[in-house]
Image (cartoon, rainbow, N blue to C red):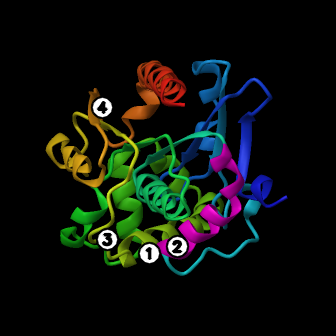
């Protein structure tokens, strides 16, 4: 089944009226969200997108463009749009989640909400600084975000295993032109760390320009990967968001 190839299920039983689909940052995979089900309500399904080229899709080629990746994910997960669907993406994952949300909306089934974390909005990406795509520059940037990764890259075998997917993801991000997109018909919820060097709270607030619905930003302590140390606080806030979405969509129906 295509949906099961594209998504890993951390919880998805019959009681899950809401499906939270999570999109990892560059170089990461579905396991980024392996602990999230424990911190979210039992009636929320927790699914994580399996990007190609890593983990249990190691042999699958990574598409040449981020738009093609979004096409593949939207096609594979189209059946989920029959449910109350919320998308969450961090860093590169926020851009991919937004592109997938747009594709669902084009097909007449927008998600109930989009949650974006640690990433400038799509229409602001045209002015971003591009990397030179050298391995050393990419590693230096990753370590600047997360010093604990230095030990991983110091291990030659691990470095050689991880770098192809990481570099491919960074090329996807660099080659993505961004630009104007149609506004979404669902609310957008933003999250960021107060010390994130990649995006400021002011830049995150520009996500409000990409929805006809409401926008709200939550700033948590930490840098680009604040969501690790602040996982409990993030999931507590997401739980409240999901409860609010559930209440409003039931009222609307």
**Gap in angstroms between the C-alphas marked 1 and 3:** 14 Å
Q: Earlier in the sequence, mark 1 or mark 4?
A: 1
| Disc 2 secondary structure class | helix
**Gap in angstroms between the C-alphas marked 1 and 4:** 26 Å
15 or 82, nearer to the observer? 82
Residue 88 highlighted magenta (yes or no): no
Q: Residue furthest left?
A: 202
**Gap in angstroms between the C-alphas marked 3 and 4:** 26 Å
Percent position of residue 20, x then y: 58, 37
Give yes or no for contact between labels 1 and 4 (Cβ–Cβ under 8 Å): no
Q: Earlier in the sequence, mark 3 or mark 4?
A: 3
Q: Earlier in the sequence, mark 1 or mark 3?
A: 1
**Gap in angstroms between the C-alphas marked 1 and 2:** 5 Å
Q: Residue furthest right?
A: 1
**Gap in angstroms between the C-alphas marked 3 and 2:** 18 Å
Image disc number at residue 168: 2
Q: Residue at x 32, y 57 (%)?
A: 183
| Disc 4 secondary structure class | loop
Q: Residue at x 22, y 33 (%)?
A: 194
199 or 250, nearer to the observer? 250
Q: Which residues are magenta?
A: 66-82
Q: Name the residue that disc number 4 marks.
A: 222
The residue carrying pointer 4 sits among few (fewer than 14), some (14 to 19) or many (20 or more) residues within 10 Å by Cα, namely some
Q: Main secondary structure of the magenta part?
A: helix
The relative height of residue 27 versus residue 169 in the rendered view (above or below) is above
**Gap in angstroms between the C-alphas marked 2 and 4:** 27 Å
Image disc number at residue 171: 1
Q: Residue at x 64, y 20 (%)?
A: 38
Q: Name the residue that disc number 3 marks.
A: 178
Q: Residue at x 41, y 58 (%)?
A: 95
Q: Residue furthest front?
A: 253
Q: Quadrant of the N terminus?
A: bottom right
């Amino acid at each position: 089944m295509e949906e099961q190839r594209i998504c890993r299920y951390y919880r998805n039983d019959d009681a899950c009226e809401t499906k939270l689909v999570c999109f990892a940052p560059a170089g990461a995979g579905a396991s980024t969200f392996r602990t999230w089900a424990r911190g979210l309500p039992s009636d929320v399904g927790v699914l994580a997108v399996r990007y190609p080229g890593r983990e249990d899709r190691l042999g699958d080629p990574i598409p040449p463009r981020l738009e093609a990746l979004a096409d593949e994910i939207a096609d594979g997960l189209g059946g989920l749009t029959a449910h109350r669907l919320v998308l969450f993406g961090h860093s590169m994952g926020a851009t991919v989640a937004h592109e997938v949300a747009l594709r669902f909306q084009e097909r007449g089934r927008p998600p109930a909400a989009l949650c974006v974390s640690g990433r400038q909005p799509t229409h602001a990406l045209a002015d971003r600084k591009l990397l030179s795509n050298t391995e050393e520059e990419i590693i230096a940037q990753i370590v600047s975000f997360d010093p604990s990764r230095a030990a991983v890259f110091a291990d030659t075998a691990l470095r050689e295993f991880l770098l192809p997917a990481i570099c491919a993801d960074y090329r996807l991000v660099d080659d993505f032109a961004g630009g104007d997109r149609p506004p979404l018909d669902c609310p957008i919820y933003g999250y960021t760390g107060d010390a994130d060097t990649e995006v400021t709270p002011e830049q995150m607030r520009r996500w409000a320009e990409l929805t006809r619905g409401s926008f709200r930003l939550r700033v948590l302590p930490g840098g680009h990967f604040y969501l690790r140390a602040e996982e409990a606080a993030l999931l507590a806030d997401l739980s409240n968001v999901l409860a609010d979405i559930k209440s409003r969509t039931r009222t609307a129906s």
